[in-house]
Amino acid sequence: MSTSVNSCNKKVDDGVPKSSVCQVNDMLRNLSTADDVIVCANCGKEGSNNDMNTCNKCKMVKYCNAVCKKVHKKKHKKECDEYIRLATEKRNEDLRIAAELHDKELFKQPPAAEDCPICFQRLPTLDSGWRYQTCCGKVICSGCVYAPVYDNQGNKVDNQKCPFCRIPTPYTDEEAVQREKKRVDLGDRIAIHNLGVCYSEGEYGYPQNHTKAIELWHQAAELGQTEAYTHIGYAYDYGQGVEVDKKKAIYYYELAAIGGDEAARYNLGLMEEDSGNIDRAIKHYMILLSLSEIQTKNYFQGDRNRCESVASKFGGHLMYDLSIPIFFVVAYVSSWIHFNKDSNGIKKA
């Protein structure tokens, strides 16, 4: 059936009188623009929104006074309870969907690390595998930093310059600090993050000031430095400059983990494990392993009993050996959980 546009700017069927449609649209428009008129659900008396009483539970029904509210309570109870039930179901469903979307974002593969600007190889995960240059603000892999340099005749020369911008390497901490201050003034996210670390630790002539450190980390994080979120989470986790708040700590750890920070991912795994959420802990560990197996092994070296405790919680027995890749440790626990689940969750040995 063909359609046409009437004077009310609405598409209507040719068979419907245009004048009727216009009248309905005008009525609706008048209702929407007129002052709100509230009617008492008990006696029908009109009044303004400010003068009416509201049902304390559903907040949907208005009364002219407390007497009408009390009289109408019994009649309204069934409708009110049904509204509350449906609203609660909808809220729970919205929370469930939000939690699923959050977990989907949290447990997806993090973005890959940046490439070295010289050799174009992916930067290593370990901190010892790369260096931040305070002269030009570039992050360069250690291979390019320590690579030998030769002159035109093929003779090896002393490489005391930045491999990217060729500015001489600073010889003193004071010179390095002055260079980093210039990078901070330029809005360099890594320099701002490093300055926050200096205030947090009270290093390189800076007074220890956790509040200033958190402020700088927030600034660096907004510029894209995900590691700064880890430091903020640690501050809330242990009460450094702020009150201890585990929920905020998890929130910032998750922001850092989504951005690809391994330390934050590991901390989340430990917190989930300590809370008894082994499945979620395993997910964090497996993602961490995919980022860097060596990095994970180094983390676990600080707590030799961690993997053994995970396995023993579920009746497993594991001889921990640092020479064994940590992947097999986590895979052992994961497989044990998979084959020992029932409908109520994980069985206890």
Image (spheres, grey):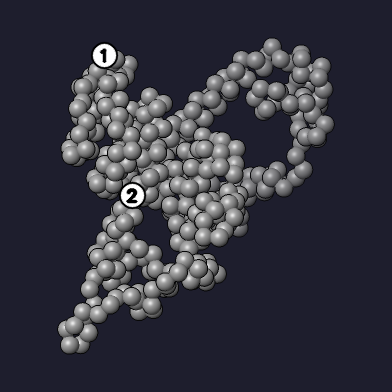
Residue 105: give x, y in percent of width and height: 38, 44
Q: Evaluate if marks 2 and 1 touch, with contact meaning CB atoms under 8 Å apart.
A: no
* Among the 4 quarters of the image, the one containing residue 148: bottom left
Residue 92: give x, y in percent of width and height: 49, 28
Label 1 secondary element: loop
Sequence-wise, the earlier of marks 2 and 1 is: 2
Tell me if I can see residue 204 in this picture. Answer: yes
Nearer to the camera, 174 or 187:
174
Image position of 217 with respect to 167: above or below: above
Q: Residue at x 76, y 33 (%)?
A: 38
Tell me if I can see residue 40 in this picture. Answer: no
Instruction: Please state which amino acid type lies under the numbered disc 1.
Output: Ala
Q: Residue at x 51, y 60 (%)?
A: 204
Residue 7: give x, y in percent of width and height: 60, 58
- The mark found on residue 64 in the picture is none
Bin the neighbour count of mark 2 within 10 Å (Cα to Cα): few under 14, some 14-19, many 20 and up: some
Q: Is residue 30 left or right of residue 48?
A: left
- Report, in whole angstroms, how far the alpha carbon at label 2 lies from the one at label 1: 35 Å
The number of callouts visible is 2
Nearer to the camera, 239 or 81:
239
Image position of 3 with respect to 38: above or below: below
Instruction: Please state which amino acid type lies under the numbered disc 2.
Output: Pro
Q: Residue at x 39, y 64 (%)?
A: 132
| Mark 2 or 1: the one toward you | 1
Q: Residue at x 36, y 40 (%)?
A: 266
For this orientation, the residue located farthest to the bottom is 153
Q: Is residue 240 left or right of residue 257?
A: right
Q: Residue at label 2?
A: 110
* Among the 4 quarters of the image, the one containing residue 122: bottom left
Image position of 226 with respect to 76: above or below: below
- The mark found on residue 349 in the picture is 1
Q: In the picture, which quadrant includes the C terminus?
A: top left
